[in-house]
Every structure is written in C-alpha cells, then in structure tokens.
Amino acid sequence: MGTYKWLKVVDVMTRNPLSITPSETVGQADELMSENRIRQLPVVNDRALVGIITDRDLRSFLSNSLLSSPEERERALGTEVNDVMTTRPLTLAPDDELQDAVELLLEEKIGGVPVVDESEHLI
C-alpha cells in the first residue's frame, strides 16, 4: 500500500456521481442502481449530502414485501428514499489520503464513501 501514499481521494474519485433526492422513490433508486450497475447512491438535497442508500438497504427493505401481495410490493417501491436511507453517512474530503480512504472502506466493510467539500456538498 505504501506505493500509493502520495495519492489523494480526488485522484480516484468518481466525478459528477449519480445521486437521488430524498423524495424520490425506492423503485426509482433501485432502477437507477440496476441500470448503472452501482451499489450506492448518495442522497442529496440541493447538492448537500443528506444520506446514502445502498443495494443492501434496498434488498433488506424490499425482502419483506417480496412474499407479500403485488399491492404491498408496489407500495414498498413507492416509499420515499428518505424513509430507507442511512442518514449522516461516512464521508471523505477530496484531499484525504487514498490510503486512509482504503483503510476506512476495509474497516467499515463498505464499498464506497461519498466525497464532500467543506460545505458538505457532494462532489
């Protein structure tokens, strides 16, 4: 890992990441993640990061409605992201060391972390 000591988060982060708003639905989040083959979606309100929703969150939430009636599944898919997302997610700054970011991912057993500026805006 020492080989990458000079790298910063900004050197490898996804620029202009896809995101979703708190009022969009679980169905919309699921579709966006499936279409783009991604596992996490930052949740933003006017560029400010307010949460994150992951494929794990969706699977857990929807698993209860998989065995239910089609009406209950439709209701679940219509639930707002705000009701399912993780609030106050871990974040990184663009000038954080890449090595520290990788250690965070491994320690927390997560696949991604939103990168925010000083104003908590998703970048």
Image: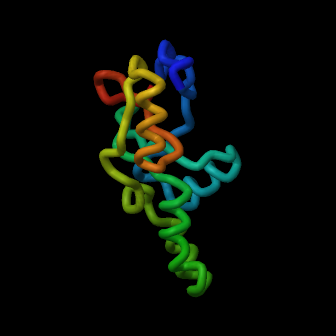
Q: Looking at the picture, does residue 112 appear above or below residue 59?
A: above
Q: Residue furthest top?
A: 6
Q: Residue at x 51, y 20 (%)?
A: 2
Q: Is residue 56 above or below residue 107?
A: below
- Labels in figure, total: 0
What is the image's colouring? rainbow
Name which residue lies at 48% across and 48% down: 110
Residue 44 as seen in the image, left or right of residue 54: left
Residue 24 drawn at (x, y percent): 48, 53
Residue 7, percent across and down?
Answer: 51, 16
List x then y, in percent, for residue 111: 53, 45
Q: Is residue 119 left or right of residue 95?
A: left
The residue that appears at 55% across and 57% down in the rendered structure is 55
Up the image or down, 26 lies above or below 5; here it is: below
Q: Quadrant of the C terminus?
A: top left
Q: Foreground residue, 27 or 61?
A: 61
For image coordinates 32% across by 50% down, the residue present is: 87
* The image quarter in which residue 115 lies: top left
Instruction: Classify residue 121 as left or right of residue 54.
Output: left
Looking at the image, residue 117 lies above or below residue 33: above
Residue lying furthest front? 2
Nearer to the camera, 121 or 1: 1
Q: Quadrant of residue 100 in the image?
A: top left
Q: State the image coordinates of residue 37 (x, y, percent, origin top left).
A: 68, 47
